[in-house]
Image (cartoon, grey):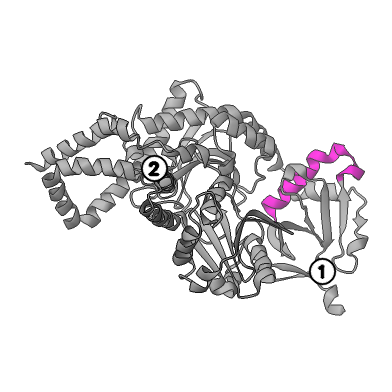
Amino acid sequence: MKLENIFHELRTEFQNYQNGLLDKKRQVAPDFNAFEILYALELPLSRMIGEFLNPSGTHSQGKIFLDLFIESFLQNDLALKKVQKVTLKLEHAIDNGRIDILIDFDGKFGVAIENKPYANDQDKQIMRYCEYLSSTFGNTNFLMLYLSADGSDPTYVSLTKEEREVLGKRFKSISYAQLRIWFLECAKETKKVEAERLTTLILEFAEYINKQFCGTNSLKNNMIGETIEKNILEAYEINLLWNENKSQFETLWAEKINLLVNKELPRLVYESLLNKGVIDEEWEYVEGKFDIRKKHLKAGLTLKKKYWKHYCLIVNSTPIGKTNGTQRFFPMIAANIKISPANTDEVNRYNNYTGCDSGTNWIGNSGNVFWSANFPDNNYYIWNYENWSEIKKDGKAVEYVSDFFAKLIAACQSDIDNLENRLQNINQYTENDFRNFINQFQWTFAKTYAQKGPHEYVVLEKVGLKYKDEFIKIAQFIRDKGFKALYYRREGYYYRVDENYYWTMDERVEDTDLINRAKWDDYELIDNTWAWKGNKKE
């Protein structure tokens, strides 16, 4: 059989599969999973995991699941397996946070699990939990498990590299792929005792993890496997051909994916929105810089109004959850400067218009993200062959992204217009404007900080609400033109004018109602951290 015929036959089989013409697709329903509907948020996932880890759980299997967990993640600690009094708590409250899952082995050893499939790390979060575990169970008698989508470590905000090294074996990052293997081991045990209902539930949850976090679909793969079986001779020849030219073919494949994502998708989505009347000629698209061969956060599609100099709508990529042949993409509103994220009302409106789950909202630590979320359809959480092949005129992927952006534009367009207008006015703000503004007020000395951090301030409430816009301009000016530094552990933006340096403290520039300043000569920067020279005199 000629090579062209081999490819044609396999393409035909795949096309039949794609179009849903295989009877088995209707029988198996590989795209359906009840947990995708019920467990898309972090808390229900923690409850599911905790229920199986709890020896007193409703599964009625005693410690068997917990023992398997110990084998998988605690180096098969036989001493822990022998502990009879084990208690498990969900959302365990401590002084400065809540631990998702806490397992107490008779007060002698503690295991905490921080479940982070979607949400951002909080300031010093993991270190705070470790300090609690140390004070409760002893300095060496605990394990802090960090469960993330792909097994990545917490961010520097939550746990620094130095703190990670100090913890050593008392801290461990694990992935949902590893957790899936544990669930499959649990299913083997329930199958032995003929707990059919429980086995089915466990396997269904394992498949949910497979689809949501591993980017694969076992049921679909089995169906494709049957297609290959029918054409085993042809498939084997292609396998030989691929292996003989693997490097060349993988390069061609990557270049094809990059072309589809960076050039075709932006153009086709733009044309679709234009034809539907969602946008007009005042809008433009920008080709992407995505490369599937690299681990990075890069946009594959950028859409914006021509006069928007700062904000844009993008489809971004991340290696989180990525497996061979796949890539995770998600929608985002971002800026090319440091900005404040969308407020609660804006976030809720964008989520409601687009159907995005609030549990997937993310802004990261870059300071450039206004809003982001996962696509509401799980088939567009991790992109693979079925998505790549539909990046074409009137293709499913193009139509899905176009429809999504139509909803997002309806929700956010006026907000971005207002933000752009304000920023473009602020960009005309100069240091002379800054100096003229600050010199017109009577500054108040902060008496409570006289012996530890002397400085002065002006408060909007005292100078008059008529200066609100000016306060915002000052705050944005400091962020745009100033520099970053730490005061104790708080990072902020600072700007020097004459003999003083100035800073504001609000997360959002729109909320600025206080401006501070201190004498430049009274402080020094040590490792980019402000230190008052008066401390040395003492």
Q: Secondary structure at mark 1?
A: helix
Rendering coords of residue 407 (x, y %): 54, 28
In the image, what residue occupies the spot 34% across and 28% down?
Answer: 393
Residue situated in front as seen by the camera: 518 or 365: 365
Instruction: Give the residue number, with chain letter if any, for mark 1.
Output: 521
What's the magenta region? 460-482
Q: Residues within 10 Å of mark 2 (few under 14, many from 20)?
A: some
Residue 166 in view here: yes
Is residue 278 toward the left or the right of residue 367 in the image? left
Identify residue for label 2: 383
**Mark 1 or mark 2, whichever is nearer to me:** 2
Determine if the magenta segment contains residue 472.
Answer: yes
In the displayed orientation, state which residue is furthest to the left: 1
Q: Is residue 179 left or right of residue 512?
A: left
Q: Is residue 18 above or below residue 507?
A: above
Taken as a whole, is the magenta stretch helix, strand or loop?
A: helix
Residue 151 percent across, percent down from the top left:
47, 59
Is residue 426 highlighted in magenta? no
**Picture quadrant of residue 133:** bottom right
How far across and how far down the image is residue 132, in percent?
A: 68, 66
- SS at mark 2? strand
